[in-house]
Image (cartoon, grey):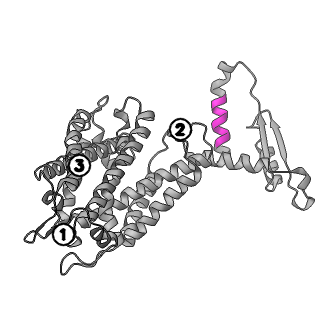
């Protein structure tokens, strides 16, 4: 339902955006001193005036703006890039839809954002851009379409954010990572997200009690940057671990691009606001430690084991007998045991002899595979307990 509604509403958004761009070409120069509107139409002098930043306070009593504060308010407009990934369960072919949809969405929105910014900078005086926040409506040939487009954009963005967040929240609840989220699991066999949506809505409403949207925006920026950074780190780790099941179809993906993306996110966090970056990182660290130390093991597959295997194999292949020296000799012991229970003292004796060397214990169970499988499970559990 939401996907169909978004398609219809997106038509109005595209029409509103197209009308904004058309107005820059069709509107004649005019001045409205009362509303502080100085529209010069296409002018190179206006473009040069607006080319460089002016970070003076917008009103008396407010601190001067910085590149970081402006970026912190602007960045939440760019977080829709993960909307498709957050709702992947609702897509028929997410492996194809998400990359294509995300890349085309990023390209289209970037072109439209830059076109509107450049057109505003080339047609509207800076005093108007600083004092009249309804400038797009004032210079539009059809003024009513701007607030209509803004309302529809707000509705679709809000619904997309609520549904995406609720989907992630319910997935976390189903994995039993946090005990206080268990009521969001719904009943068994139900995919309804009603409770998760209501919880997400409640958290969103709590943000309004701050009283200043610009005060909340930097924290929204921080948590989204952390999310982007960890997505890049996850891709980097999977690439370094050479995981067989990690085969990205994006031809330009490299390990260094993932590393650059993660470092870029952390750098932007510090540029926006160091205090907010530290607070957000602290919250994420506390959540990570809570999950790591309190949650039982999950059957997701631990990437650390893949990294350990990859590194062990890598360094074992680098061993060269021709470079070996007596000064660094270590005993290599292979012990074959028939009955581990009666050979415990021998196992401990060889373990004391190895002195940092390689110690391999071989235990062969003879018999029919299906009949001896329970015995194998018991022996395997006993060996792992001994190793631990």
Q: Which of marks 3 and 2 is nearer the N terminus?
A: 3
Q: Position of residue 163 (x, y in %)?
A: 27, 42
C-alpha span from label 1 to label 2:
46 Å
Main SS of the magenta part reads helix
Query: Is 382 a magenta residue?
Result: yes
Pointer 1: residues within 10 angstroms few (<14), some, or many (20+)?
some
Residue at the (41%, 60%) spot, across then down: 286
C-alpha span from label 1 to label 3:
20 Å
Query: Is 377 a magenta residue?
Result: yes
Question: How many numbered marks, from 0 up?
Answer: 3
User: Where on the picture, by quarter, is residue 206?
Assistant: bottom left
Residue placed under numbered mark 3 in the picture: 17
Pointer 3: residues within 10 angstroms few (<14), some, or many (20+)?
some
Q: Which of marks 1 and 2 is nearer the N terminus?
A: 1
Residue placed under numbered mark 2 in the picture: 249
C-alpha span from label 3 to label 2:
33 Å
Name the secondary structure under disc 2: loop
């Amino acid at each position: 339902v939401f996907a169909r509604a978004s398609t219809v509403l997106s038509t109005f958004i595209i029409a509103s955006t197209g009308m904004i761009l058309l107005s820059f070409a069709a509107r004649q120069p005019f001045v409205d001193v009362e509303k502080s509107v100085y529209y010069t139409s296409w002018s190179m002098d206006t473009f040069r005036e607006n080319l460089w930043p002016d970070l003076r306070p917008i009103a008396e009593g407010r601190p001067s703006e910085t590149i970081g504060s402006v970026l912190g308010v602007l960045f939440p407009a760019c977080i829709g890039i993960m909307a498709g990934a957050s709702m992947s369960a609702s897509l028929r072919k997410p492996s194809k839809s998400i990359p294509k949809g995300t890349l085309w969405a990023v390209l289209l929105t970037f072109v439209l954002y830059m076109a509107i910014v450049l057109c505003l900078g080339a047609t509207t005086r800076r005093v108007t851009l600083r004092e009249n926040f309804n400038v797009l409506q004032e210079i539009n040939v059809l003024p009513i379409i701007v607030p209509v487009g803004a309302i529809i954009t707000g509705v679709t963005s809000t619904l997309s954010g609520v549904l995406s967040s609720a989907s992630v929240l319910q997935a976390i609840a189903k994995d039993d990572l946090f005990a206080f989220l268990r009521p969001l699991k719904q009943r068994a066999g139900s995919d309804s997200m009603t409770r998760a949506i209501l919880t997400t809505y409640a958290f969103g409403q709590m943000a309004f009690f701050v009283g200043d949207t610009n005060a909340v925006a930097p924290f929204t920026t921080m948590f989204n940057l952390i999310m982007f950074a960890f997505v890049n780190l996850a891709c980097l780790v999977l690439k370094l671990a050479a995981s067989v099941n990690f085969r990205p179809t994006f031809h330009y993906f490299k390990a260094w691009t993932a590393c650059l993306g993660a470092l870029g996110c952390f750098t932007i966090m510090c540029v926006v606001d160091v205090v907010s970056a530290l607070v957000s990182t602290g919250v994420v660290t506390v959540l990570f430690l809570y999950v790591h130390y309190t949650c039982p093991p999950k059957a997701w597959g631990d990437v650390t084991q893949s990294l350990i295997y990859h590194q062990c194999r890598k360094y074992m292949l680098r061993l060269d007998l021709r470079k070996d020296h007596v000064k660094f000799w270590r005993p290599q012991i292979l012990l074959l045991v028939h009955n581990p229970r009666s050979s415990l003292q021998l196992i401990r004796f060889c373990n004391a002899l190895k002195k940092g060397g390689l110690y391999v214990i071989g235990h062969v169970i003879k018999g029919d595979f299906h009949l001896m499988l329970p015995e194998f499970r018991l022996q395997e559990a006993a060996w792992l307990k001994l190793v631990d």
